[in-house]
Image (tube, rainbow, N blue to C red):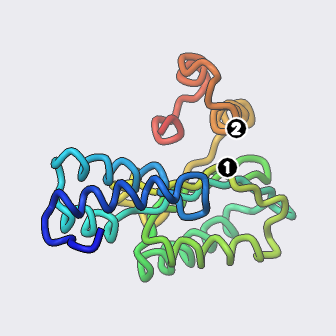
Amino acid sequence: MDDLSTEAARRRAIAWATALAANTPLEPQAYEQALLDEYAVGALTLEQVLRLLDERVKHVLYRSRATQAFTEEQISELLETSRAWNEQHGITGLLCYSDRQFVQLLEGKAHPVDLLYARIQRDPRHQQVTTLSTAQGAQRFFADWQMGFVTADEGEFHWVLTSLEHPSHNASLIEQYVQDPHLRT
């Protein structure tokens, strides 16, 4: 592994390093592994892999409960402040609110998303902040929204949470009970 001057040698070195990292904290995440697999078969160059890794989008999906019900005015203030912060930090996503409960998808570069999520976890307006999933990918789901906002009735919100917490549930049931197309995303 001393001579990495050829593409084939670099591919072997990366495959070797990936195998060594298996079942350790250094193991590539799914998105990273998909890029490395594309590199291994020659579909991507190393430069393309590095660029795509640099451009990856972190997604954090969480739920929380408000310490008290939000008024329409409080929701408006929250959205105005959050949208300005998100725009400044390159974060997009969708917030859903129903009966003191929030579900939100945050997306953007890892560091700003992590900073924002840490702020949310410390925010005294929230309790029971629960991470539903974190992932990295090539694209945003809500690229045009610094923070999209949807309210849902109690039944629709229940089905959204059920689909997020138990993804194996029948998708056709979700489509039947969840009307807003943004919530189906």
Q: Position of residue 126 (x, y in %)?
A: 79, 66
Residue 76 position by quadrant: bottom right
Image position of 54 (left or right of 95)? left
Image position of 18 (left or right of 169)? left
Q: Position of residue 7 (x, y in %)?
A: 15, 61
Question: Which image quadrant: the N terminus?
Answer: bottom left
Taking the spot 58% from the left edge, 29% from the top edge, the residue there is 178
Q: CA distance from mark 1 to mark 2?
A: 7 Å
Image position of 50 (left or right of 22)? left
Which residue type does callout 1 highlight? Leu
Taking the spot 48% from the left edge, 59% from the top edge, the residue there is 93
Q: In the rendered image of this protein, does residue 95 appear above or below residue 172? A: below
Outermost residue, front side: 2
Near mark 2 (Cα within 10 A), the count class, few <14, some 14-19 or many ≥20, is few
Q: In the rendered image of this protein, does residue 147 appear above or below residue 102? A: below
Label 1: which residue? 132
Label 2: which residue? 165
Taking the spot 62% from the left edge, 25% from the top edge, the residue there is 168
**Circle 1 sits in a helix, a strand or a loop, which is it?**
strand
